[in-house]
Image: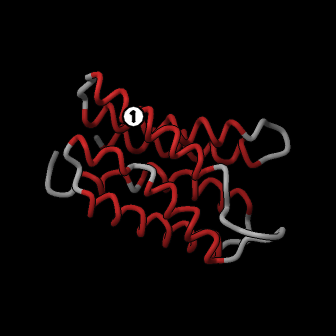
Amino acid sequence: MAIAIIIGAIASAVAYRMGGSDTYNPKWRDWGCSLIPMVVLYHIYGKLTLVNVILYLLTFLLSWGALSTYWKKGADAKAINWFFHGFGIGLSSIPFAWIGIAWWLILLRAVVLGITMMAVSELSDNVYVEECGRGALIVLTLPILFIGGL
């Protein structure tokens, strides 16, 4: 599990940064940071049934939607915007409640993801640290979903 989380966090950090740069298409962030956590979760959870595939797809789509907004008006994002950005990405895992992941763990991850994304964005002025940090956090917070076992 730890290796999957580390590799996934690095891949998600790269995808998040690529999607935020002027060099690459923004879909790198939207698709990459939505797909990578699903691959990591599949590696950890390991059950591939029709219901699970549908839940992975729903989570992917919700994550894609959350990643495509910073929950702001105007040009500059503030601390609260970064909180809601992370919180929304965290809530995108809500379909996993149907496979036995406790809803309160999904909510806990959403809050932790919101707080940590806000902290990374507010404590750094380096775009690479901010974007790679936010991308990595999407995967680094996944173990919260498995507190108490699978």
Lateral position of residue 123 relative to residue 77, left or right: left
Residue for point 31% across, 52% down: 143
Instruction: Give x and y (percent) for residue 133.
Output: 58, 58
**What is the secondary structure assignment of the residue under circle 1?**
helix
Q: Quadrant of the N terminus?
A: top left
Q: Is residue 111 above or below residue 3?
A: below
Lateral position of residue 52 relative to residue 89, left or right: left
Q: Which residue is mark 1?
A: 56
Instruction: Give x and y (percent) for residue 4.
Output: 37, 37
Mark 1, other Cα within 10 Å: few <14 / some 14–19 / many ≥20: many
Q: Amino acid at mark 1?
A: Tyr
Q: Is residue 48 above or below residue 59?
A: above
Instruction: Give x and y (percent) for residue 78.
Output: 70, 76
Q: Nearer the viewer, residue 110 or 65?
A: 65
Q: Quadrant of the C terminus?
A: top left
Lateral position of residue 25 relative to residue 54, left or right: right
Display colour scheme: secondary structure
Q: How many marks?
A: 1
Q: Nearer the viewer, residue 41 or 95?
A: 95
Residue for point 25% across, 43% down: 98
Residue for point 71% across, 68% down: 72
Residue for point 45% across, 50% down: 92
Instruction: Give x and y (percent) for residue 140.
Output: 42, 53
